[in-house]
Amino acid sequence: MHRLQRMGLWLAVAAGLAAAPAHAHKLKVFASAEGATISGYAYFPGGGRAQGLKLVASAPDGRKLAEATTDAKGEFSFLARFRCDHRLAVETVDGHRATFTVEAEELPESLPPLAGVPAKPPVSPQAPGDTPRPATSVGTSHEAIEHAVDRAVSRHIRPLREQLEQAEAKRRLHEILGGIGYIVGVAGIVFFLLGRRRTAGTGQFPPSS
Amino acid sequence: MHISEGVLSVPVLVGGAVAAAAGVAVGLRKLDYEQMPRVAMLSSVFFVASLIHVPIGPSSVHLVLNGLVGVVLGWLAFPALLVALFLQAILFGFGGPTALGANTVVMAAPAVVCYHLFRRALRGQRRSVALGAAFAAGALGIALGCLLLGLALFATGKEFLPVVGVALAAHVPVMVIEGFVTASVVAFLRKVCPELLDGRPPRPGEEEAAYA
């Protein structure tokens, strides 16, 4: 019987090896800002995109800022109205939930800060609720160049950030083996406790079989 | 089948934690020295099974194997799944630490139900009945899990039927696969180690009575 159980453990390890390259079933969401537009997508790592999910963007203090729904490709986009951290949350019907934060620094400085949230001083103070100035305003002003650079940079680093996200979602072998190791460790502790309880009455060591 | 962090309301989380604690307490009372390796082994099987994917449509679901854990462990499924779910939460981000209690109940309670429903059939003389029961246990573990998932979300304020419908539809392939996996494991255990299917090893003197 002990041989059988040892074999079972090895089977579990082998299954872990086989499953190592797979991804977890887990909902994830990715987003980045390009100008004042926040766009991204919701997906299941290793599966497909998550379609038709409602996405809620809220401020750090919990105020709701915007809402969007993922389309047939799992993508969404909306216009940011304030320069503050946007905490995006999507939720599936069956209880999976994912969050992602687009930080204030990614958004153009022309957007007003959210009232009540400490933010870096904006370039041009505007009352909250104002619509942002169009990010595509043509001109040779310093601001326009800054916008263009911001947008180009965010467009170019986006694939990189996507890759980073995906690499993070990947299950690594050492995590699986580590988990099995923990279970073996917990089992060892329970063995010890049970063994103590068992020998306490008899004053004998447990039979070594 | 894992409910994520921040989805359930606080009363549901607390209720789940209390129910899970009760289940684990019952399980630990039944735990003894001989069963420990078996509990640890099924705990690791469950821990790893969640990484095996069944891609369907845009989503993808994973194996759960709570029916199998149930028919072998009975009430011990509670402590076994608690440990495995905790590790899944911290290592893989499945579910989460606060939802641990609710997730344990969602998956371990069906395991216990399967154990009580199919225990006799699995040990019976007729192989076909035993394998049929094993298949049913594998499938029912998932189906009941979906039902409990729906209840947990319903108690949080979601609608019941749509949630259960979506969850069940997504898990139909998993139910079939787990039915086969459970049946093949039971077929193997019947051959090499039938006492494993009783949930506890026969004590000296009890062996003859059990097989009479």
Image (cartoon, coloured by chain):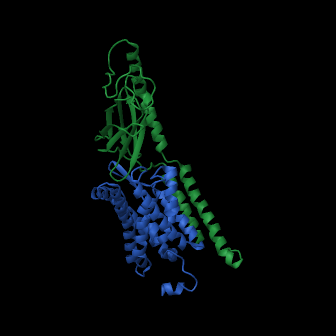
Chain colours: A green, B blue
Which quadrant of the figure has residue A53? top left
Q: Position of residue A5 (x, y in %)?
A: 56, 68
Q: Nearer the viewer, residue A131 or B5?
A: A131
Residue A47: give x, y in percent of width and height: 38, 47
Task: Classify B84 as above or below B33.
Answer: above
Look at the image and tell me whether residue B133 can be seen: yes
Q: Residue at x 31, y 56 (%)?
A: B163
Quarter-of-image position of residue B31: bottom right
**From what the image shows, is residue B134 above or below residue B45?**
below
Residue A77 point in image, percent of width and height: 32, 34
Residue at the extreme front of the image, as rendered:
A116
* The N terminus of chain A, quarter of image: bottom right
Residue A146 placed where, x, y %?
41, 18
Q: Residue furthest top?
A: A140
**Seen in the image, is A182 located left or right of residue B113?**
right
Q: Residue B120 sits in which quadrant?
A: bottom left
- Tell me which residue sits at (34%, 45%) in the image: A50
In front here: B166 or B96? Answer: B96
- In what quadrant of the picture does the C terminus of chain A appear? bottom right
Number of numbered tags placed on the structure image:
0
- Who is closer to the viewer here, B29 or B179? B29
Looking at the image, can residue B2 be seen? no
